[in-house]
Amino acid sequence: MVFGNGVTAKVNLLEGSCSCRIFDLVKMPCEHAMAALRAKYGDGVGYGNSIYEYSSPIYKASSYLLAY
């Protein structure tokens, strides 16, 4: 559960889902998932790397280059 600005969101990092549905639909961490990742990894290198781990492979440069 992520709380902020009067909004509560339920984030499941293992399933890549959030109750706001942005994480589910776009396959890139929403603001709630980012807050959950920061709580899990802190502000260090692990946090920055975790964003890519929880994003869909379609957003990686190698996938983009394969498409074109």
Image (spheres, rainbow, N blue to C red):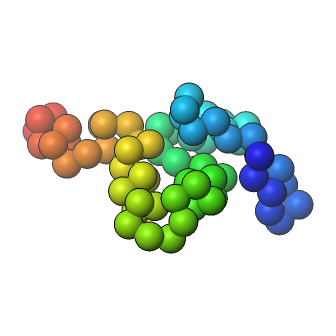
Quadrant location, the C terminus: top left
How far across and how far down the image is residue 41, in percent?
52, 59
Q: Residue furthest right?
A: 6
Residue 28 sits above or below residue 21 on the image? below
Residue in front for this viewpoint, 7 or 52:
52
Q: Residue furthest top?
A: 15
How far across and how far down the image is residue 37, in percent?
56, 54
How far across and how far down the image is residue 29, in percent?
52, 48
Give me the residue at 57% from left, 39% from top: 13
Residue in front for this viewpoint, 21 or 38:
38
State left or right for residue 35 relative to residue 65. Answer: right
Residue 23 sits above or below residue 43 on the image? above
Give me the residue at 11% from left, 35% from top: 66
How far across and how far down the image is residue 32, in percent?
66, 53
State left or right for residue 15 relative to residue 55. Answer: right
Residue in front for this viewpoint, 9 or 37:
37
Is residue 50 at least partly visible in the picture?
A: yes
